[in-house]
Image (cartoon, rainbow, N blue to C red):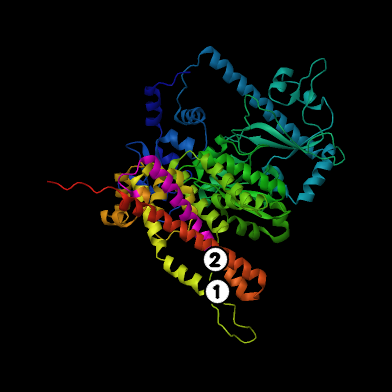
Amino acid sequence: MSLTPQWLDELRARITLSGVISRTTRLTKAGHEFKACCPFHNEKSPSFTVNDLKGFYHCFGCGAHGDVIRWMTDQRGLSFMDAVKELASEAGMELPAMDPRAAKEAERRDSLHDAMAAAQAWFVDRLASVEGEKARAYLATRGFNQRTIERFGFGFAPEGRQSLKAALSQFPEAMLIEAGLRIAVEDKDPYDRFRGRLMLPIEDARGRVIAFGGRILDAQKSDAPKYLNSPDTPLFDKGRTLYNLHRAGPASRQSGRIVVVEGYMDVIALAAAGIEDAVAPLGTALTERQLELLWRMVENPVLCFDGDVAGQRAAMRAVTRALPLLRPAHSLKIVRLPAGLDPDDLIKRDGPAAMEAALAAPQDLLSLLWEHERDALPLASPEDKAGLKARLMAHVDTIADRDIQALYRRDLTERFSAFAFPRREQREWKPGARGVPAPRRSDPAQTARLRKNAGSRDALSAAVLAGLLRLPGELARHADGLAHADLADPRFAALIDAVDRGERLESGHLTTILANRGLAPPSLEDYAALRFGFLAEDATDEQACADLDQAVSLLVERPALEAALAEATRRFERDLSDGAYAEQQRLLKRKLEFDSRLRQMASARAGAELNAPAKPMAE
């Protein structure tokens, strides 16, 4: 079948766009157009317009735009061809003739639909018969009323291996096999796929039965899966199908939300409790195509997982599947139910209001990722913590969108730094407090040396900043280490952001970035005053990079060393033990050695300048 542009234009001309849209969206006349609150996103004042003369709708809030065919595909969830067929029938237009091969394929699909509809009718009939007594008893234990049973089309498949074939004798054996209703094996007669199971139809966006799911009823039968779905067929692709989408789609346009649960029984339990906007994948983790279907309806689908180990694994599978696909304004929200509960359990225990409360307070994807990896393994050693960071960054690297990747990297790095290098508040010490003897005093000479060296802190920070601007190619190598350090100078954060965003690492460009944030780059006077080898004009790039490496190491090491020394001092002040005193003195010695290394770095250049031959005076 060839749909020419002229034929499609004729179809659009015969259909009144506002008439189609008004079936599901309340429109108000506004001059030559119609207005409404946008059905594609939540809003309080109308920004959605429909223009029959121009034949398109447009939302000034979210940018949704299209013609009547686009409306049918985006709002109704139909495929392009299904939308065209429905509109053509409404407009009284004959579809162009198909080529013989396409016509035969369409006829085959129609015949398969007929077979699936006949099977569904037979399953429903068997549920109401004497054979279906056990299935009806199971439904009673789930608390489903008759309306829910009929609405979702529950049925029953008897135990016999040839029962369905006998009931659907008007369809050839090959068709029943192709539809997934029968199983063919070599050297044996084909047999019914579903036997002794409670049956549930799986429908497409138009509400047509395309597959089945069956739950086993004999609890003692351990050689068969508890749940069994149809295989992929010409009608059914489990990776492209979401259970209950044809019902949840219209409901989600009213609620502004779509809920994804683990299985179809969860969907039905929610619907029975009045929560109509739920769907479920069919035996697999969410696929890329299913995520795209969800994002066409809402920007942040809510994924709800059971509170058991399997549920947590399913949550992480969904997260890892979604990360490469994230795009601006589109993400996932996660709800993790209390331990050991699924949606049906929670509703039965605490009522529908408890389920609604859980869905109203979801966790964002980034927080779930952080908490999962933080709690996945013990974090007792520095190596364990480094492993945590490596796992987090591996997830970040899978994100295709560079802006989102940079933001995830920055946020997770900050969370890791706060966890691995926590800030410690200095407790006030009051000598001679009641019941506590005055502490042993530190060596006055050591204290004097520490005070003398305190002024070198800002000099080191300023020198490293100047060095990175002089050698911008080194910035990417040191960005992670600097991100972990507790640096007060906001210019470091600006440079790390530039790396995360993939900016050009050139001195002039980085200086412009600082200026745009109202931050001044180091001046020529600063360079002259900072006596570090990597800032010397005559230093080779190789030597300057090596000296800068040492300076960055010192800058990153300093906050951890100072925090450890402060903690050791507090511990000594609390218990006054010899062990605490020895630890404080050990760290104090390390701190003095650190300051000595820092002075040596600065004095090395000063010595080189003094020993350099004098420049000849100009004549």
- 135 above or below 481? above
Q: Which is nearer the eye, 211 or 598?
A: 598
- Judged left or right of residue 480, residue 315 is right
**What secondary structure predominates along the stretch shown in magenta?**
helix
Q: Nearer the viewer, residue 378 or 131?
A: 378
Q: Residue 597: image x %, image y %? A: 46, 56
Name the amino acid, label 2. Answer: Leu
Q: Which residues are drawn in magenta?
A: 535-563
Check the image and report above or below for 500 versus 488: above
- Measuring from the top left, give residue 320's x and y in whole percent: 58, 41
Q: As drawn, which residue projects farthest toward the right?
A: 220
Q: Residue at x 46, y 72 (%)?
A: 448
> Regarding mark 1 in the picture, which secondary structure is present there?
loop
Q: Is residue 197 visible?
A: yes
Pick the front one: 513 or 237: 513
Residue for point 47% across, 31% down: 87
Q: Is residue 487 magenta?
A: no
Q: Is residue 410 left or right of residue 311?
A: left
Does the magenta portion include 536? yes
Q: Is residue 100 left or right of residue 383?
A: left
Q: Nearer the viewer, residue 41 or 376?
A: 376
CA–CA distance in space, label 2 to label 1: 9 Å
Q: Residue at x 57, y 48 (%)?
A: 389
Label 1: how many Cα within 10 Å (few below 14, some 14–19, many 20+): few
Looking at the image, do the residues carrying marks 2 and 1 touch, with CB atoms under 8 Å apart?
yes
Confirm whether residue 39 shows in the render. Answer: no
Q: Which residue is mark 1?
A: 442
- What residue would you read off at disc 2? 588
Choose top left, top right, bottom left or bottom right for residue 436.
Answer: bottom right
Horizontally, residue 196 falls left or right of residue 432, namely right
Q: Amino acid under label 1?
A: Ser
